[in-house]
Amino acid sequence: MEEVDLSEALEQFDRVLANIELLEKIWKRFEPHIPESISFGLDTDEIEQMRREFADTVESMPAIDGHRIETELPILDDISHMRFEYAEASLEIEGYRHLQDYIQEPKKAIDDYRYRVIKLRRKLARKRIEHVVGIVDECLRNTTETEYGREFNEGINGWPLLGNALDEIERLRGQDTLQHTRVGDFRRHIYYSDAHDLRDIVERDWPDVRTALVDMVFEGEPLSVAVGDLGELVRAEPMGPVTNRLPWERLNSESFERLIFDLLRLTRSYDNVEWLTHPNAPDRGRDISTERITVDDLTGTRRVHVVVQCKHWQSRSVNIEDLVSLLEKVQLWSRRFAVVIVATSGRFTQDAVDWREKRDQVGTFPPVEFWPDSHLEHLLASRPAIRAQYFRDAE
């Protein structure tokens, strides 16, 4: 399939949503005409016009993974005839239920189609939202505390960048609401663009808006369950050994990064989880930055900046050269990290393990932690929701 421009794709979704609203308006015009009692001769020219408008609009709607709206407005005389037949046969209760299903079928079909469109649009915008969030994160990292608030570092045209990013976020989010966040304060502070406004954006507005956006991006799909009754499953007394081993080959590099991101953001001892996308990264991979929170009853709470490098490598292990290159890249970030974590779906060479142990013995900064596949499997064993979400059937 040829490459499609995201703006054009969003425009197509907008058109579909506009047609859904048109269907809903037709239904609202039609609904008051539905008879509550037995009455015939109701299908006037006006009603027939509504039925044609509804059918024409339905015909314009594209399929969603093969699903289409396959219904039409009910015939009013048929509704009256059904009421008469059910009354004659003394089937008022059963007939009422069947009749209500017949009457409400168009409304249910519209609601189901809208749900599918919004769900698919969210999936369409997901990657771009991640990218824009990364842009804002990087922009705000390049600010400095001053006497009056915060200022952008020299050479960074931050205010236009923030304004454009917020405009894009508003476009991308669609019908997903941000009304309970500080998005209005964020826009107001961009408008005034003073040092104290930037401080409020860094400390209050963006963390609040960002949390809503990340939750929106990581909203999971329901998982298929192969059993109808969990009680029956237990009564079957399943046997056999259980293993923590995970089919890492089911993931690609992007889904592995997302798994690590999700693991960190859902763990209470980590906060402010962010993607770091370096524009000159040869593998176009993303580092993840976060704050590790350590609570000591005697000395209080300590926060340290951590960077995580994700390596979804199944064909080879991480070696010393990879680690040296990683540390060189870490030095390019504007933020100084206190810990470097290398998370891999594979393993580390013995030379790499020896290299790290020697660094630890002499206290070389920054310390490097290894998260191999076995460590990740241990972490995910106690987090079944994440495990199930990322290791569903291979795509």
Image (spheres, rainbow, N blue to C red):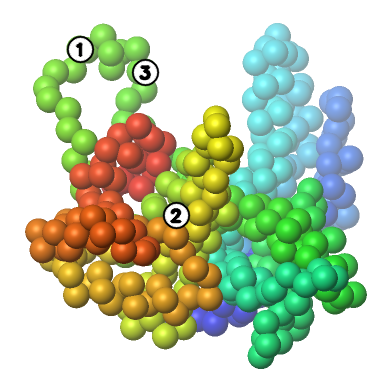
Say which element carries label 3.
loop
Q: Are marks 2 and 1 in contact (CB under 8 Å)?
A: no
Indicate the position of residue 348 as horizontal and vertical percent values: 16, 59
Instruction: Answer above or below: position of 272 versus 355.
Output: above
Seen as rendered, the residue at the extreme bottom is 155
* Image x and y of residue 128, in percent: 55, 71
- Three-letter residue code for mark 1: Glu
Q: Earlier in the sequence, mark 2 or mark 1?
A: 1
Callout 2: few (<14), some (14-19), or many (20+) C-alpha neighbours within 10 Å?
A: many
Residue at numbered disc 1: 237
Q: Which mark is residue 229?
A: 3
How far is the residue under mark 3 from the one under mark 2?
33 Å
Question: At 28% from the left edge and 13% from the top edge, which residue is drawn?
Answer: 234
Residue of label 2: 261
The residue shown at (82%, 70%) is: 147
Q: Amino acid at mark 3?
A: Asp
Relative side of 306 to 384, left or right: right
Q: Vertically, is 389 above or below 279? A: above
Residue nearest the viewer, comparing 137 with 296: 296
From the viewer's perspective, tell me whether residue 173 is left or right of residue 336. right
Is residue 65 visible to the viewer in this orientation of the structure?
Answer: no
Please tell me which of labels 3 and 1 falls first in the chain: 3
Q: Is residue 305 left or right of residue 161?
A: left
The quarter of the picture where the C terminus appears is bottom left
Among the 4 quarters of the image, the one containing residue 108: top right
Residue 202 horizontal side relative to residue 194, left or right = left
Q: CA distance from mark 2 to mark 1?
A: 36 Å
Q: Is residue 155 visible?
A: yes
Towards the viewer: 148 or 18: 148
